[in-house]
Image: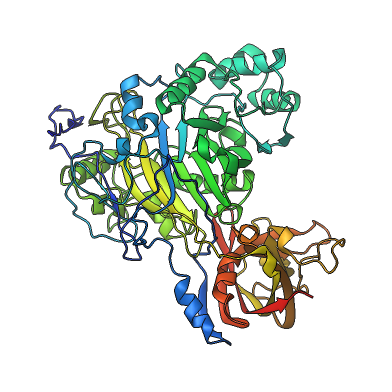
Amino acid sequence: KNVVHPTVTMVTTSNKPVDPPDMEVSQRKHPSSGSSAGHASDNRRSKDHHNSPRDPHRHHHHSRSRDHTAETKAKSSGNTTEKSSNDPLRRGLRIFIGTANLGNAAIDPSSLSSWLPSHGRVRHVLHADISSSDDNGDDDKNNVKRGGKSKRIDDAIDSHGKLEVIVIGTQESLPGNRPAVTSGITSFMTGATTASSTKRQQQQQQPQQPPDSTFQNVFGTLGKPVDDLVHSLGKPADEYFDSLLSKTGDLLVASSKNSDLPLLSGHTKQLRTSIRHHLGDDYQTVVEFQRGEMMLFVFLRKDLLPASRVESIHAENTGLGGILANKGGIAAVLTVASTKLYFLTVHLQPHEGRANFDKRNADVEEILAGTGGDPSVMAHHAFVFGDLNYRVAFPTSTRGIAPTKEESWAVCANLIRRKDWKGLRESDELEKALREKKILCGFRTPMCKFCPTFKLERRSGFHYDKKRTPSYTDRILWKSMQQNRSIEPLIYEPISSFATSDHKPMRGLFFLPERQPLNLHRDEKRMLQLTFKKLKCKSLVPTPDLFQSDLDTFLQIYCEPQSLLSQPKPSSKLPKPPKTKTIQTSDRPSWPNEVHKLIINVFSDEDLAGSRLFVKSVLESKVLGNATIGIAMVDLEDLVRKSLNASEWEEEGVETVFFRNGKEVGKCFFDLLATWLVET
């Protein structure tokens, strides 16, 4: 089958096109474990049952067992991604992530069809006609490999099935709006939810009701530039927004999954209708949320609905003054079977320069703080995607002189012409931020082996505009917090034929293997006692408003779900989580003589699925109140798996990381002893 290469043009004063780099690059998974990406089950017959969390930053030292069978069991609890001779197709979730900055323009049907999988078919993504690109960079663990033109990831995925999860995030989603800041602070969603937060206040969910005239007035402000509003209202913008928030806040409409309530405007309703029609009737919208110009959609295949629920949806604005909703993020947490999935779509600070780079980093931290906290704690697997706006920024010269815009554009154009993706990566701000752990610690993103996705002319192909240095602004990142299950990236690519925006949208296909069951039975009635010894912390980082001398710290240890905690008596309340003594004015507190215990009920596989242990470092203050420094996660299910066939199992020097809003804020060390108890 012939492949038509898209026209790729650099817009120059001479209007001469450069050589066309092949942009629609299929990228295959190259697992760090050395195994190839595997099969997923036939969607028409299988259901998803999985789970088990993981802390990728935890390392174990001097591990030993007090029963020789523990070693045998450790070998049997290996990675679930291995193929079975009896079941050549690996079971799991196939997750599609799509993100697009729509440039405040309506999507034409051809662009939409090229971006999203028709009726959720896997083969629409796996078998799309592509042009292959030469690889001028060394492979590493973040690369997603490319395959041939007919099938791009070996035979690992059943291309005749349908995707289980489809997630779509859009930015600048209001056609006709000028690309200035907009004033709307509104939200819309369907499906179960808890709350939505703003920088000024957090509103409680309101009962389902039709929008009244007050809300209609709010809708009317959507898409209007701030200067127009100020002129019409005759009051300062800040005063207007204070009044707006105090009267209405967010509109949060909770409805049944089958409801079909109108969106905020005809344009966004048309976008929703087009997406639903394209995906087909096999999918149910479980999240549909709009905050200003940003939108988040989550669709589940209908056979997964009985085992799924929406845990929470939050949003945070980072536009002008932290009020305007043209920038910010929307986060949703879903449980599918016993696996918690976290999805965050963002639109960060634009433009080039060091100050804007720092503002983007600060925006990420602010969005995480305003949408519920660190993804490492909120879910087992997390995705962050959107118009992150990180740019290709070339270093200064040996004399400390920064390149001009014209020079940066020319260097970038030359790298693209030579398909030097590694050279572009070295100057990618997002790679720099991840490498220096300024944002989203532990998250990964594939190497971009394609041309930058911004800034382009609004037509098919890659025709760059000289107003901005071509950059990889549109990205998808992921992180797994499980020991025996990890997200496997399969496809990661831009859509060159998307013609209605100055960005090219991105799409990614990811595989999450099915959880390996523990094969426990409720009639066993066993309990596992976990003993924590020699607890200590290092390099604790206080919140920005505190000094290092203010660190009076204690630790709390608890599990999720709390129902796993053993009760002294059937009618008694759940025991309080263990708590250490407070250590004053130290970023390296230790408790060498303290011993803390938790007793966990291990009655059934279903009870333990997705279970986790948390160690929280808490700043004690009698004046300001206690505040969380950071939270570290330990995979409880994995601990049970390791100790199943041993009467006692011990691990010395367990190391885990405290996270706060995407940053590492210290480390925790302890010895852990697991002892099986017999229920009397």
Q: Nearer the viewer, residue 238 or 629?
A: 629
Examine the rendered structure and indicate whether residue 366 appears above or below residue 671.
Answer: above
Q: Is residue 213 visible?
A: yes
Q: Position of residue 440 (x, y in %)?
A: 50, 54
Q: Is residue 353 visible?
A: no
Image quarter hosting the N terminus: top left
Residue 117 position by quadrant: top left
Examine the rendered structure and indicate whether residue 161 appears above or below residue 478.
Answer: above
Q: Position of residue 398 (x, y in %)?
A: 27, 59
Residue 629 position by quadrant: bottom right
Q: How many marks?
A: 0
Q: Position of residue 405 (x, y in %)?
A: 29, 39
Point 33% across, 48% down: residue: 157
Examine the rendered structure and indicate whether residue 504 appears above or below residue 177.
Answer: below
Point 69% across, 36% down: residue: 200
Image quarter hosting the C terminus: bottom right
Q: Position of residue 234 (x, y in %)?
A: 66, 14
Tell whether 562 sits left or right of 179. Answer: right
Tell whether 499 sits left or right of 197. Answer: left
Examine the rendered structure and indicate whether residue 204 appears above or below residue 479.
Answer: above
Image colouring: rainbow
Residue 245 position by quadrant: top right
Q: Nearer the viewer, residue 243 or 250?
A: 250
Tell whether 424 sits left or right of 234. Answer: left
